Amino acid sequence: MTATQIVLVAIIAVAVLAALAAFSIASRKPGPDWRAGMDVRALREDRSRVLVAATPAPVTAEEEETQVTVEAPVESAGVRPVEVVKIEEVSADEAGVTRRQFFNRATLALFGTFSIAMGGSMLAFMWPNLKGGFGSDIDAGPIDEIRTQVFQADGSITPLFRPDARAYIVPITDEELAGSQFVDKSLAAGGFMALFQRCVHLGCRVPWCNTSQGFECPCHGSKYNYTGEYEAGPAPRNLDRFVVELQDDRFIIKTGQIIESPRAPEKSVSYPQGPSCIAIESAG
Ligand code: FES
């Protein structure tokens, strides 16, 4: 697993943990009902609140006359009835969604949407793209056009670079192929192979050196001949490559699988065929 994939997996893990935390907060149950276990009469009494004047207001002579004439309600020992305030309790269904419930549900929905979107985008990034791009079968074009672009008039070669496949298309003759370790592995078609651009030492992109007719890595100096066989430097093996095939005379690079191969004891082509680019740059 590459460092990029490890970072992406870590991001997904953090997103999932955040979603779980939000879910646990949102689904937290309320505390115990304090009414549970209380006496029914006590609960009934609690629904009503009777306000009683502590000290009766002095009754004027005029009020006394009014009370007598209209037959005022029964009063006893200086206590008189006053307004009764009733507090009606309602069920959860009658009360509807509370502000707290709304907030919890909104938080849960937000984190759920965020997690799904992030997880989906990460999976789409990590999984091979089945509709095109690196990881799929890439059509590099008609084999005749590739041949025209690779073989130069002076007899040298210039590999055709395909950015979407991250690959160099390099030539190999039937004779060279027969003496190499790549024969019978579907690594050549129509006289060409596809080399992964990444250096097998620490992953730098390996540029083509026209003077030496090979690939030379500027990072730590690994060198490969034009069929991608190891020649020098700290690289542990040949350049990696892809399975290729011809479909209606079009060169197809199958980038869904990267093929590794060990250093070859016998090289299929000679290297270098001229000055090294790394040597030229360091001398300058
Ligand atoms: S990354 Fe190419 S030689 Fe080190």
Image: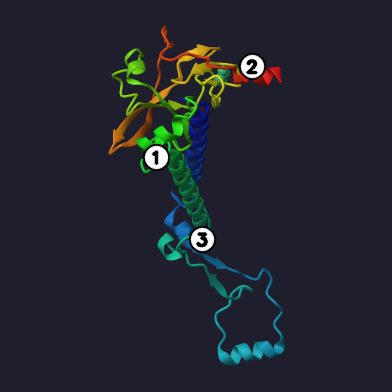
* Residue of label 3: 46
Mark 3, secondary structure of its residue: helix
* Residue of label 2: 279
The 10 Å Cα crowd at callout 2, few under 14, some 14 to 19, many 20 or more, is few
**Quarter-wise, where is residue 195 in the image?**
top left
What residue type is disc 1 on? Asn
The 10 Å Cα crowd at callout 3, few under 14, some 14 to 19, many 20 or more, is few
Q: What is the distance, in whole Å, between disc 1 and disc 2 at their CAs?
A: 39 Å
Residue 192, image x and y in percent? 37, 27
> How many marks can you see?
3
Which residue occupies the foreground of this view, 32 or 193? 193
What residue type is disc 2 on? Ala
Q: What is the distance, in whole Å, between disc 1 and disc 3 at their CAs?
A: 67 Å
* Residue of label 1: 129
What residue type is disc 3 on? Asp
Q: Which of marks 1 and 2 is in front?
A: 2
Residue 234, image x and y in percent? 55, 12
Which residue occupies the foreground of this view, 118 or 34? 118
Q: Is residue 191 above or below residue 81?
A: above
Q: Nearer the viewer, mark 3 or mark 2?
A: 2
Residue 41, image x and y in percent? 44, 58
